[in-house]
Image (cartoon, helix red, strand yellow):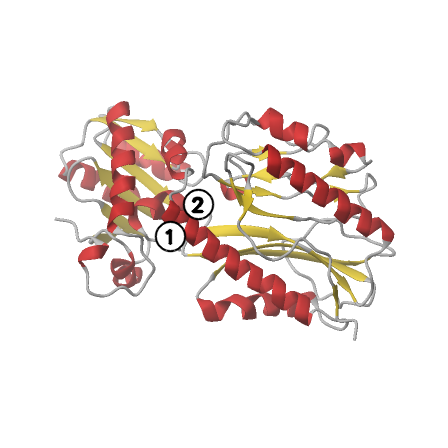
Amino acid sequence: METRPWEREENLYPRFSRQEYERRFKAVRGMMDREGLPALVLHGGPGAQGAVHYLSNYIPRSPAWLVYPREGDSTLFLHFFNHIPCTKVMSIFGDVRCYWPSAAKAVADRLKELGLGRGRVGVIGLGNSIPYSQFVALQKQIPEVEFVDVSKPYNEIRWIRSEEELEWFRRSAYLTDLTCELLERKIRPGLSEHDLSAIVHEAFLPDGGHMGIHFIATTPMADPGRFVPWQFLTPRTLQAGDVVITEITISYWGYGAQIHRPFAVAAEPAPLYRQLFDVAWECFEQVRLALKPGSTSEEIMEATAIIEERGFTVYDSLVHGEGGRNPEIGTKSSSHTFEPFTFQENMVIVIQPNPVTKDQRAGLQLGSAVVVKPGGAVPLHNYPFKFPVCGGR
């Protein structure tokens, strides 16, 4: 019989309630029944943690597999043997094993143990995380199993968030807000971009957050050379008259709320940057009000039109879901491939207007994670939509 988190004495890591996990199991097993699947095989890793985490409470730090049967005990397979003790406390499933030297053999043997060495088995992670060679090896291990990709219906369950999940998103938003507040207080001429990274970490580490991303770029507003946040920081030193543009996610136990704010360094925002900020704010509000249950990608794209009407373009997506996709929506003139999508209540989506001049010299990003609601999306963050001047004294 599986050990559930509510049956343990120690609670060293955050966990949802018994009712929340039972809600998830019921929804996922309902999907399995509709698809005729006696088991799911899920894969996760550092860049794709959500699927495994949703059922197990384990956040993959290296490649991990989860065998989740319709009946019987679930088994979590890890790459590293020495990760098992910590994972056993973290996971809600008691059966945690190392799959080394062969993930394919370990997963296949477990399916055979469950009497599932033939027939249909659902698989989640084919599109974004399962290594091709391992999946081919798994198929060879159990050739009588028909693997069915059910990532889409599984993720459609995950992406409609419960009230407990929304509280964890709000916790992430709070930690991310702390980073903006500390950046506002500490940004000044003379700091390097690496110093800014240290400030970001200083803000959330005492409260148990995990770094999601902190993309930052700095450039002179009078002669800009960077127009989007950069994924790797440079030794560049801040000077009066610079702008700092950011894209930051501090996660709380696998749940991440993303924020985007600009900061002016020891000088008021230059007229062009004030214009970029104003159009980004107007676009954010138009998209936020349009983002309701039943809204489509087409309707959201229409709401972004102000960017182009004001003579700007975008370089990043303007709206996205989990992982920077699901969906990924740009403007009519941007290079993003159109992704049909219908939004539902309690989905968490990022709205991130990023107006850029057409010569790609100047730009900024302004936005936040929001929850889709009937009256329009509701921001998760409390840090204001502003363009503060930092380090001016």
Quadrant of the rendering where the C terminus is positioned: bottom right
Q: Nearer the viewer, residue 187 or 369?
A: 369
Residue 70 sits in quarter: top left
Percent position of residue 135, x then y: 35, 35
- For the question of whether residue 99 can be seen, the reply is no
Query: Which residue is the site of mark 2?
Result: 48
**Measuring 56% from the left and 53% from the top, which residue is drawn there?**
381
Amino acid on which disc 2 is placed = Ala
**Measuring 66% from the left and 41% from the top, which residue is drawn there?**
284
Name which of mark 2 and mark 1 comes first in the sequence. 2
**Measuring 56% from the left and 39% from the top, which residue is drawn there?**
320
Work out whether 186 lies above or below 343: below
Amino acid on which disc 1 is placed = Pro
Percent position of residue 214, x then y: 59, 57
Work out whether 334 lies above or below 245: above
Secondary structure beneath disc 2?
Answer: loop
Work out whether 328 lies above or below 19: above
The number of numbered badges drawn on the structure is 2
Specify whether 5 is left or right of 231: left
Q: Are the residues tagged 2 and 1 within 8 Å (C-beta)?
A: yes
- Label 2 and label 1: CA atoms lie apart by 8 Å
Secondary structure beneath disc 1?
Answer: loop
Specify whether 88 is left or right of 251: left
Label 2 packing within 10 angstroms: few (<14), some (14-19), many (20+): many
Query: Which residue is the site of mark 1?
Result: 60
**Measuring 60% from the left and 32% from the top, which residue is drawn there?**
290
Label 1 packing within 10 angstroms: few (<14), some (14-19), many (20+): many
- For the question of whether residue 85 can be seen, the reply is yes
